[in-house]
Amino acid sequence: MSVTTIAPPANPVERFLRTDRMPHIWCPGCGIGTTVNCFTRALIDAKIDLDHLAIVSGIGCSGRVAGYVRLDSFHTTHGRAIPFATGLKLANPKLQVVVYSGDGDLAAIGGNHLIHAARRNVDLKVICVNNLIYAMTGGQTAPTTPGQVVTSTNPYGTFDTSFNLPHLVEAAGAVYVARWTTYHVRQLSRAIAEIFQKPGFSFIEIISPCPTLYQRRNKMGDGLDTMKYYKEKSKVKNGAPTSEVGLDKQGEIIVGKFVDRARPDYRELMVNQMHESLGSRFIDPVAAECEEGEPQGCEEGLCS
Amino acid sequence: MAKGTVLIEVERCKACGFCVEFCPTKVLALSTAFNSKGYHPPHVIAPEKCSGCDLCGMFCPDFAIFGHRDVPAASEINQ
């Protein structure tokens, strides 16, 4: 059989990519590209207005996503994707702001920003690609690295307790918490489409292989072996208590939608508080814009 | 009769094998030929089995492959 080269119809992901930057730098078997596929399929399914969408990434392998997608995107400093996105969201509440970054960026150097954004319930959609290690800098132990794993900074195995990210963000106050692996492409795509309809701090953790630094050093095979492991050992438990979904080296991976609740978000609380203390002296900038005849904000019900 | 077609951009492939492993109807296999980077891209071994589900396209981390339904499913017609 001959190999077919690309011809119309085009790949659905193609119009979301900066094709001049392809091929990307991610290793063979890395799961980040798979998450980008799911993300772009979710954008199509949820019919997101691309003019009102911004992607913010930090530093790391998954931070590269901001540079590869042909959307309004920002590649920020290490760990500061969430503060940057918070500012973006507050200055322009009409934007859908997606934070697309890795575990080292969001949970390690940006750990404080993560919990405080969840506490304030800022309307951000956080997608955390968790490969359980600092991949771009050479495979050092990250706060998410489970026990008995060989890394470049723990050559005899890690021994400290790792972060259980769904539990952390739920405790901090996130309104939507889910975990999927790169094997669960359809579920992941549906989950991403779902968080666009969900006001408040939404968090999706995606377990992803790092064949070069994590799996290879631990003799766990390549990317494909890891995907087979995800297929075999992951168990869907929607609504599972997040305290019981911690990860270990070769054990079961509990996936699913863990938390879906409603809380007033940061802007709503701020506007209410300002109205209460300032009364008629407070003018909501978004509502003021609507009165001047800019229709977009009104459609989204921001100034009701 | 194939319901779908799979299209491959050989030069982007890094031969991770996700599409070959997870194709539900086993349409693909890694070929013995090389691309210019020295990887073995997949090729179609059973075109008649392709359902056009695009699962290969969702798995491919290198955006090198996708499936296309020749007859769109009812849910896709309105899009």
Image: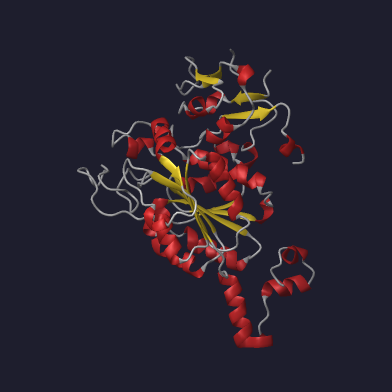
Q: Residue at x 68, y 24 (%)?
A: B3
Residue sitting nearer the eye, A227 or A29: A227
Q: Is residue A162 above or below residue B13?
A: below
Q: Give residue A37's quadrant in the image.
A: top right
Place of residue B47 in the rendered image (x, y in percent of width and height, measured from the top left):
62, 18
Direction from residue A128 to residue B75 in the image, left or right: right
Q: Locate the C terminus of chain A and report the quarter of the image it occupies.
A: bottom right
Place of residue A196 in the rendered image (x, y in percent of width and height, measured from the top left):
61, 55
Direction from residue A62 to residue A108 in the image, left or right: left
| Residue situated furthest right in the rendering | A293
Residue sitting nearer the eye, A30 or B72: B72
Is residue A69 visible in the rendered image? The answer is no
Q: Locate the N terminus of chain A and report the quarter of the image it occupies.
A: top right
Q: Residue at x 63, y 47 (%)?
A: A43
Is residue A202 visible in the rendered image? The answer is yes
Direction from residue A270 to residue A303 in the image, left or right: right
Place of residue B56 in the rendered image (x, y in percent of width and height, measured from the top left):
56, 30
Q: Give residue A288's quadrant in the image.
A: bottom right
